[in-house]
Image (spheres, rainbow, N blue to C red):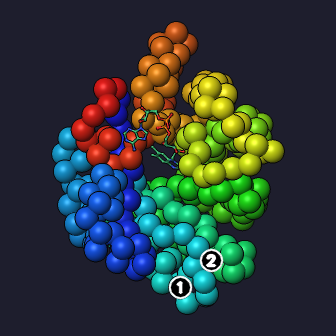
Amino acid sequence: MLRSAFLYLSEQQQIFKFVRNNKLAKSFANRFVAGETLESALGAVARLNAAGITASLDLLGESVHNEAEARVAGQAYVNMLDRIYERKLDANVSVKLTAMGLDISEDLCVTTMHKVLQRAREYRTFVRIDMESSEYTQRTLDLFEQRLYPAYRENVGIVLQSYLFRTYADVEHANLTKARVRICKGAYKEPDTVAYPDKKDVDTSYIRCMHALMQYGNYPGIATHDEAMIKEAKRFAKENHIAHDRFEFQMLYRSARSGIHI
Ligand SMILES: Cc1cc2nc3c(=O)[nH]c(=O)nc-3n(C[C@H](O)[C@H](O)[C@H](O)COP(=O)(O)OP(=O)(O)OC[C@H]3O[C@@H](n4cnc5c(N)ncnc54)[C@H](O)[C@@H]3O)c2cc1C
């Protein structure tokens, strides 16, 4: 049932420099980063594929500062899709809209994303739009729904975070539009005006969202390392006769390779 792992590939120079030169940071980063170059990350993908695991590659580094940087980042994703296709790997990509120019202009971001999505469509593969901090949630969902999803229904999906109060409503909406969703708990430090401060509430929300996606959603990605969530997904699938090919589990690199019992 373990179908997907999530690989991070860092090309952001400052982070790179720090990680390369700092022993502690390097050993921490190696837990999650599949490779410092595209080729080494693709090698990691090939090893995962051989173990029956699909991968999603993410080029690390969030906001870009000008149009040229956004175009370079977009082109890096196009190259990544080309190499995945050439090597016949079972992998897709995950992308942050701020890396595609969202902070500079929405039109730039859409133009950059069109290039990535057109290539993904040619190869019949998939692009997941990562979710960033809550200041981007509405913008990300609007841009997805109004400007990308209508043109690339089969090739693009989103991420929702169970720590936000709003998320169950977003899940219900995504189920109506049949958009593909990855559900995660959420990784950013958020104020208690928008997000549950207590882990138990985040977990309760996660289970509620996960159930709704499994029952009514379009092939949800259940992204977690929490064995209690994984166990609950399996129990819920069995109880409701939800076939294993209607959803997938997703984990960060290494967690998927080495530890968690699915
Ligand atoms: C595939 C994937 C994609 C993601 N995409 C996004 C995104 O787009 N936006 C976003 O905000 N967040 C994203 N996240 C991060 C997510 O929101 C959480 O911050 C993170 O996954 C930790 O939550 P958890 O569900 O694993 O459970 P937690 O409750 O945090 O942890 C449960 C247990 O898992 C262990 N654990 C936590 N992390 C790891 C790990 N890396 N390896 C092994 N064990 C671990 C903990 O020690 C704990 O025992 C993603 C996570 C995954 C797995």
198 to the left or right of 233: right
**Relative to residue 173, is residue 117 drawn left or right?**
left
Q: Are marks 2 and 1 in contact (CB under 8 Å)?
A: yes
Ligand 1 lies under 8 Å from the Cβ of mark 1:
no
Left or right of 254, for residue 132: right
Q: Residues within 10 Å of mark 1 (few under 14, many from 20)?
A: some
Amino acid carrying mark 2 in the image: Gly
Q: Is residue 180 left or right of residue 28?
A: right
Which residue shows up at 55% across the image and 90% down it?
A: 68
Q: Quadrant of the C terminus?
A: top left
Give the SS element for disc 2. Answer: loop
Looking at the picture, tell me which residue is in the foreground, 146 or 53: 53
Q: Quadrant of residue 25?
A: bottom left
Residue 250 coordinates in the image, percent (x, y) = 42, 40
Q: Nearer the viewer, residue 152 or 21?
A: 21
Q: Is residue 62 above or below residue 47?
A: below
Q: Which residue is mark 2?
A: 101
x 62%, y 26%: residue: 200
Asked if ligand 1 lies within 8 A of label 2, the reply is no
Q: Earlier in the sequence, mark 2 or mark 1?
A: 1
Q: CA distance from mark 2 to mark 1?
A: 8 Å
Q: Is disc 1 placed on a helix, strand or loop?
A: helix
Q: Position of residue 104 (x, y in %)?
A: 69, 81
x, y (%) of residue 217? 62, 33
The residue lying toward the viewer, choosing from 229 and 127, is: 229
Camera sees residue 188:
yes
Question: Circle 1 sits on which residue?
Answer: 69
Residue 145's image quarter? bottom right
Q: Is residue 226 above or below residue 67?
A: above
